[in-house]
Image: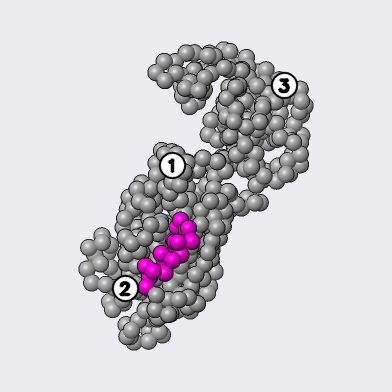
Amino acid sequence: MSQKLLLNAKEINIILQRLACQLVENHRNFENSVLIGIQPRGSFLANRLFEILKMDYGLTALAYGKLDITFYRDDFRRGDKVLKANETDIDFIIENKHVVLIDDVLFTGRSIRSALTALQSFGRPSKIELLTLIDRRFSRHLPIQPDYNGRKVDAINNEHVKVCWKENDGEDAIYVLKN
Amino acid sequence: MKELSVSNLLGIKYLTTEDLHLIFETADQFKEVINRPIKKVPSLRDITIANLFFENSTRTRLSFELAEKRLSADVINFSASSSSVTKGETLVDTVNNILAMKVDIVVMRHPNPGAGVFLSKHVKASIINAGDGAHEHPTQALLDAFSIREKYGDVAGKKIVIVGDIMHSRVALSNIFTLKKLGAEVKVCGPTSLIPKHIESLGVKVEHNLVKALQWCDIANMLRVQHERMEHSYFPSTREYVQQYGINKALLETLTKPITIMHPGPINRGVEITSDVADSEHSIILNQVENGVAIRMAVVYLLASKIKNYEN
């Protein structure tokens, strides 16, 4: 297996700053908007954006939740992998809210499809947007595109994009792994 | 990724400690699901489950049915009193006829111990034992341990006394297996006639004095006196049983520390437990019922994930 560094910590930080900026541009003071990170790996990204919005833009009252999509996935009983659930932590109702769904890598689009279904259990949002750090274009199985995106990547099928976060993996870095 | 070591839930005896933790961790997530505005997930929308109850049940049956429906499974219910069992059909034939209608999971309660194990050897479906005679009632024990874990953070090291009719109780046996596997200390308490001989071999201690047992424990699990399973008299009178093994508020107030009261239901108010105790803040009886749905969702979900229909 070989791995190639795609983005280093500094480059990731620049992208995070830009994404936060774009969110503020569209949502201003977030009075009717909420951030929702998809568990487990989207939550790291959502956490970072939440911190930037809080520290740099003073958005301390921003509503932020974590959504687990395990029970909504479309590959239950279809592989060897057992789908183990993660924690869902959404302590608000998203009825009539403007939701920003956050995930690290957009690949087939199936996770996002599951997340859209899962969100319905928490109310009827007025609008849902999608924010991703990496968009693996040309690999989509479903008609789903991000509204905010960090970097587009043309990775082929046997390649894997791995996003590392300091708090979980010891460093901020994004690699392309090849089998 | 972890999965259950078994493909049927026949008894706690057959589970590993890792299985128990996996079930609890999954149930944590389902407990969150059943407290949402919309309490349903689509995971099992292509699974069909038959609930076969050859013995009466209210709580367990409703709890299983609700758990299955909250997972979006298709559910069929069957009770022995209104079926062909009364016409002389055998258990294997009854179940195979039901399975011919493409059922994936069978939840069964049966008056004979070992009915689940027997069935699992003869039919192709995942079997969940919802109580087999005086043998095991695994989901009840799981929800009991889950409720203890919820209140105390962990089951390991806790002192639990199971009071009452240990002899005829499947809840007692499953509870003993579960609690010992999780590292708790267990005592059983009841009249000599209702404590099976050699029960110490399961790693539990026997105490005949209720006050001493309550003073020792953190949690008391009060069992119902099962008059329907008693072919002869095991104690002189209900009144005498109540005096020696029933708990009431005055008795609990004599203890030096508060203890948690559990009961698997149905309660015989005024026999093993008085109303003022059952409805007090120390009782977690209704939490047990709520947790029952989450635990059964976890068990059904984890067993269903082992049924692979899409390999070809």
Disc number for residue B311: 1
Chain of residue at mark 1: B
> Percent from the top left, x then y, of residue B119?
35, 64
The residue to which callout 3 is attached is A22
Which residue lies at the image location 32% right of the left edge and 50% below the top edge? B16
Chain of residue at mark 3: A
> Percent from the top left, x then y, of residue A179?
42, 20
Q: Helix, strand, or loop for circle 2?
A: loop
Of B231 and B192, nearer the camera is B231
Kindly identify the amino acid type of the residue bearing the numbered disc 2: Met
Q: Is residue B97 magenta?
A: yes
Is there a contact, CB below 8 Å, between mark 3 and mark 2?
A: no
In the visual, does B199 lie left or right of B34? left
Q: In this rendering, does residue A150 appear at all?
A: yes
Toward which corner of the image does residue B168 lie, by quadrant? Answer: bottom left
Region in magenta: B90-109
